[in-house]
Image (spheres, helix red, strand yellow):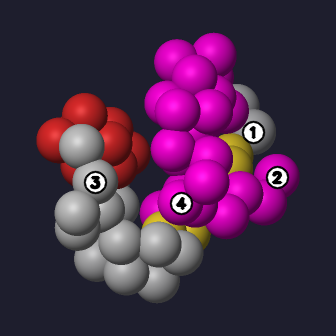
Amino acid sequence: MAEQIKITLRKSGIGRKEYFTRVLKGLGLTKLHKTVYLKDTPEIRGMIRKVSHMVEVED
């Protein structure tokens, strides 16, 4: 089984470029302080890197 990553939305996507809100939605982060568990894949890591200033990540 692949390792999972815990991702929590810490800053809102409101007032940001649409690109950032689409990445957050792709990660499943729709509300502030929502936490999701996703598989640790290169694709997910790339999405996290794009919004790293808005999320908190725990391995």
Q: Residues within 10 Å of mark 2 (few under 14, many from 20)?
A: few
The residue indicated by pointer 4 is: 54
Seen as rendered, the residue at the extreme top is: 42
Give the extent of the magenta segment. 34-59
Seen as rendered, the residue at the extreme left is: 18
In three-dimensional space, the C-alpha distance between marks 1 and 2, rounded to whole angstroms, equals 8 Å
Across and down, in percent, residue 22 comes to: 22, 40
Which disc is residue 3 wearing?
1
Look at discs 3 and 1 and give the one toward the viewer: 3
Q: Residues within 10 Å of mark 4 (few under 14, many from 20)?
A: some
The residue indicated by pointer 2 is: 59
Question: Which circle's residue, 3 or 4, is located before the other in the chain?
Answer: 3
Amino acid under disc 2: Asp
Are dots 3 and 4 in contact, CB under 8 Å?
yes
Look at discs 2 and 3 and give the one toward the viewer: 3
In three-dimensional space, the C-alpha distance between marks 1 and 4, rounded to whole angstroms, equals 22 Å
Q: Residues within 10 Å of mark 3 (few under 14, many from 20)?
A: few
Q: How many marks?
A: 4
Across and down, in percent, residue 11 comes to: 47, 72
State the residue at coordinates (63%, 16%): 42
Asked if residue 32 can be seen in this view, the reply is: yes
